[in-house]
Image (tube, grey):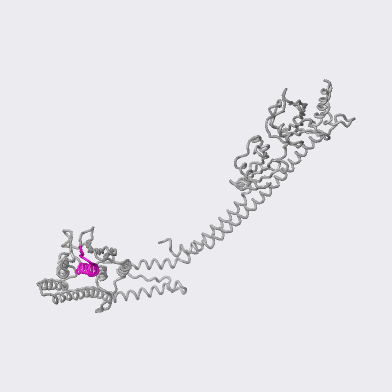
Amino acid sequence: MAFFSIRNKLFLVFIAISIIPITVVTFSSYRSYTNLVSKQTSLVASNTINNTMERIDTILQNIDRISITLQQQTSDPASSITIRDELKKLLAANDPYSPFLIRNRLKQIFENLILSYDYINGLYLFSPDGKSISYGIGTDLKVGYNPLGDDWYEQTIAKSGGLYIGNVDVKPFIINAKPSIMFSRAIYDLDSQQFLGVFMLDCSLDIFKGLDRDIIPNISSLYLANGEGKILFDASRKLIGQQLPDAIFRQVKAMRSDQAEFHEGGKLTLIQSFPSNDWKIIASISLAELYKEYGISKKIILYVSVSCAAIFILLSIVLSNLITKPIVELSRIMRKNKSQKFVTADKQLRRMDEIGILYNEYDKMMKDMDAFIRERYQNRILTLDAQMKALEAQINSHFLYNTLESINSIAEVEEVESIAVMTKALGDMFRYSIKTDSELVPISDELKHVDNYIAIQRIRYEDRIRFDKRIEPGIENAKMLKLLLQPLVENAIYHGLETKRGKGCVTMRGFARGDRIVFEVTDDGVGMTPEQAMELRKRLAEQPEFARIGERSRQSIGLKNVHSRIALYYGPEYGLSFESAQGAGTTVRIEIPAMA
């Protein structure tokens, strides 16, 4: 095949020793590049999270400081009375005017505090009985709102003075409410630990302004979420109050420490937990988009690699053609000599390298082969004819020996007319065997020869062996090589039925199949073992050997000789085959061309 030519093989070798290193270097360079980008991305994301955590921590510290300062702030600069004191007075007031004055003083404190922080929407103070003191910018509590029993209120009290952080949502109890986040703390008397009320701070989402200053648009996302997966803040401002995406929320649930890193779906996700609450800060970076931003390096690597590969491929083609051209030319000359007169190559005979040696040796070989074939051709034909006659003589001698042995055995046991029948049949077979008019005989003559052999064997074996002959009408007049069928019947008797207990049967079938004539001889004898069948197939597969004139082969006659004669005369596509099973018998089949 052209694909396996030496030129293609040499080309593939050149490609292998050039493209493979380029591929390895390209892959290694690109992998190192992507690993570096990934590490840098992870570092940037980690720094972003740390910076964001510091900002959020600063915000929470401010809220915590506001709530503590509010409790410690005095209602009158000229005195040391604090808001806690005012709340105690409010709880203990008996006249109708005191609560009014206390509320006004507290609202004044709230007003000063709101003006100091632009992200505070309102300050609200709830007494233990649910009454409120509030101050807001463009907003206020709804009339009659009582927080007792609300979830945020209960959780605030449960923290026993600790800071409670609510969700980002619209507060239904606030007028003109917008999405906001609330912070609340229960207030207690420092001396008696008496519960004085609940302080609540409502803040707009501007409290998180600046958290996303390190985020690269369209590449990375930043989320601030609580423990339930609800988004408190995101860089796009579109998902606030919604649930985290399923993939990220699943990663949050899979965390086993305060910090985790995930590579999934072409994204790098870093998650950091807050030590003081259940908040999570999440940075998600799209590596695919990031690689697009930094794709120039990847393109340069690919361009250089492709350019080098193209150059090496061209060099491989040129070198392989240059080296193999004389060899290809020699192979064409050798192929041409198969069907035409011997052609020698003169173009490369003057070369002194290995190519020149090949051309000179081929030229010498062609001349020697031409002389040898002309000298030996006729002798080979004579040898073939002599070999075929020697094979035929082996079969005749073997049969004659067996037949005479049978006659002698019968003659010793009893004197009967069967001897005369056997003698006549033997004579007919002898005359048929030594007939030298032609190697080819009508099939009807070959079948008569088989009938004579069967007549002898019927006398010898009596009713122990039954013979059945089934010949398709119309093939008797065709010609075939003589002495092919009788050895098959003889083989079936001596090797198949001789050692079988009880009666046996030999069946001969002859029929035409396409442009061939097929004969099958079947016995129901002992059959062959797998080892015997394998050995016979091996011998049949061996090429016919040509001995010197007059020399006979020492191997046994029978199936091998029949197969050899058919192959030598008709060609290797014809011959003998068999099927055998131990204890079930053997079928031997020969195929010859249909010849008129």
Q: Position of residue 251 (x, y in %)?
A: 62, 44
Please say whether residue 569 is visible from this viewpoint.
no
Residue occupying image coordinates x 79% and y 35%: 67
Figure quadrant of the N terminus? bottom left
Residue 494 belongs to the span the image colors magenta: yes
Answer with the quarter of the image where residue 3 lies.
Answer: bottom left
Answer with the quarter of the image where residue 530 lies.
Answer: bottom left
Identify the residue at the far top of this view. 96
Identify the residue at the far front of this view. 192
Q: Is residue 116 left or right of residue 345?
A: right
Residue 548 belongs to the span the image colors magenta: no
Figure quadrant of the C terminus? bottom left
Answer with the quarter of the image where residue 52 lies.
Answer: top right
Please say whether residue 504 is visible from this viewpoint.
yes
> Observer-nearest residue: 301 or 245?
245
| Magenta span | 481-507
Q: Position of residue 361 (x, y in %)?
A: 40, 74
> Observer-nearest residue: 275 or 373?
275
Q: Position of residue 226 (x, y in %)?
A: 67, 39
> Observer-nearest residue: 568 or 84?
84
